[in-house]
Amino acid sequence: MLRLLSIRNFAVVEELSTECDPGFTVLTGETGAGKSILLDALSLLLGDRFEARQIRPGAERAEIAAEFGIDDVPGLHAWLSEQDLAEDDTLLLRRVLDVQGRSRASINGRPATLTQLRDVGERLIDIHGQHAHQSLARPEAQRALVDAYAGCAVLSRSTAQAWRRWRDAVERQALAEAEGGRLLSQQQALQARADELEELAVTTDEWRELGQNQSRLAHAASLLEAATAADAALDEGDAAIVTRLASLLNKLRQVQRFDPAIEEIGDLIDGARIQLVEAARAVRSYRERVELDPGELARVEERLAAIHDAARKFRVRAEELPELARSTAAELAAIASAWDAEALAAASEKARVEYHAQATELSARRRLAGVELSKRVSANMQDLAMAGGRLEIVLTPLAEPASYGLEDVSFHVATHPKQASGPLARIASGGELSRVGLAIQVVLSQAGEVPTLIFDEVDTGIGGAVAATVGRLLRELGSRKQVLCVTHLPQVAACGEVHLRVTKAGDGDAVRTSIEHLGATARVEELARMLGGLAVTAKTRANARELLLQGSGVPVER
């Protein structure tokens, strides 16, 4: 719901701010006072293009801002989150325009594009009139209205999703068929590589062990010589280190009784001797294991050569061959899946059946809803200066299925009995389009999702009882939505729950537009002005009081 609208330096408005109420609000004022400026400002705020001449003369820039309550707007919180524009239950829109033709917009204080303004605007406000935002004339909007009335908005979205899944499956099948030769060649090359790698069957552990074994076997003689020398030095012969340490330790033990410090030194030497004895034992054990085995060395080196040959052939490092084998198998599996013509055809057919099942149900529900909606809207048209007029909802089968179903949905209208029906946007005049929109919105008020409706010039070409009917219908609609209506008819204005008067004062560059909320007494004066023009008499005031009592149930003291 629109809560607040603020305008600065736009057209003849220097600065204007007004709070907006729920229910049915009417805006009145003299011709040229600036009532349409409010709608033009809202249209710009919701993404319309602007011209520099719309900026107030003498000003460098114009600014338009609005605050909306969005608790009752389905899907808007999710959309804001997706766009990283989420806040709380209040939405703030702002647009700044300068004389160089530049424009800046923001949503909840964050920079926004005009596309984002339009997207959010379509969820917030629907303007019915001769100017922008005439969503009723758009085929997609007409289709959405029928779907909303049929209660199948969710089915419509799921049908679109099913259509996209079907098209994706068809595209995958076509791509596989078109690239069949390339895929076959790629598959054969991969299979040859996979076979060779499988025959080689090298593993990461084997590669590591082969390297270690090759190094050991290739240097076995040197290893054996070093181990023998170490054994001799440690524990063989009279000059062995272990023997010499034992002799030294024996001498120290003989004299340690003369000085306790010698005992500590002896203990350290004894510990070293024990360690060296263990080292000598380990050297002898190692020497016994070392073998001079030229045959094993030749086998290891032959295996390493085969691995290196494969690595050079496939242009990877030898240690990467196991991973290459795994990735080759994965690529083969992917190609087999992508090139499985039978599986792709089955997937495409399954997606087609799922789409057609949903689209067929959607068509059936649209037909039933279209008949009922046409009757109810046509009935409302009889009271809106279109006696004998009718609305026909036409479902035209498509040559090819689309994301939105199996048919186009269009509103055809005839505004009088002798007129042949035709597309709404082409047949209806501006005022008629607004009144047809009113008739539709009254019927759809329970199903529609946009919380704020604005009607401009719905009173064009009508008067008397018809004007009173328009006012009554708008008031009825205001019990379910926020409704704002710009009107010149006192019969319509008298039905408003809230009455705003737009006035213009001054002349030349000093022109100022202002807006005020009218109380009961001021409403009588405004209605009297609308009834009698400049000459407001006691009789026109009496008529105004009667209109206000009939339209809004508001008694006013004389």
Image: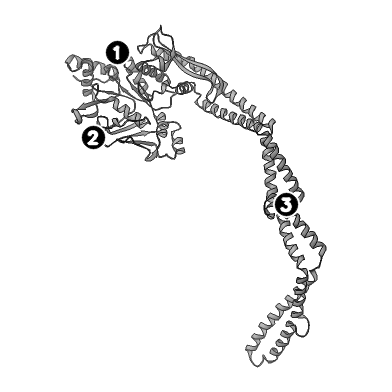
Q: Nearer the viewer, residue 432 or 274?
A: 432
Q: Amino acid at mark 2?
A: Gly
Residue 499 visible (yes or no): no
> Residue 523, how many percent across, how many down?
23, 22
Q: Earlier in the sequence, mark 3 or mark 2?
A: 2
> Residue reaching furthest bottom?
258
Work out which residue is located at the far top of the displayed protein and give it: 418
The alpha-carbon separation of the residues under discs 3 and 2 comes to: 81 Å
Residues at discs 3 and 2 in contact (Cβ within 8 Å): no
CB under 8 Å between discs 2 and 1? no
In the image, taking residue 537 as reference, residue 131 lies left or right, namely right
Tell me where residue 274 sits by quadrant. bottom right
Q: Which residue is mark 3?
A: 310
Residue 196 visible in the current orientation:
yes
In the rendering, at what x and y percent does residue 86 appear?
Answer: 42, 39
Q: Nearer the viewer, residue 312 or 201?
A: 312
- Name which of mark 1 and mark 3 comes first in the sequence: 3
The amino acid on which the numbered mark 3 sits, given as a three-letter code, is: Ala
- Circle 3 Cα neighbour tier, 10 Å, few/some/many (<14 / 14–19 / ≥20): some
Quarter in which the C terminus is drawn? top left
Residue labelled with disc 1 = 463
- Distance CA(mark 2)–CA(mark 1): 41 Å
Q: Which residue is mark 2?
A: 58
The mark that comes first in sequence, 2 or 1, is 2
Above or below: residue 148 compared with residue 336: above
Residue located 65% across and 88% down the image: 262
| SS type, badge 1 | loop
Color encoding of the figure: one colour
Residue 317, given in percent of the width and then of the height, sits at 67, 54
- Residues under labels 1 and 3: Cα distance? 94 Å
Task: Report helix, strand or loop for mark 3.
Answer: helix
Q: Mark 1: which amino acid?
A: Gly
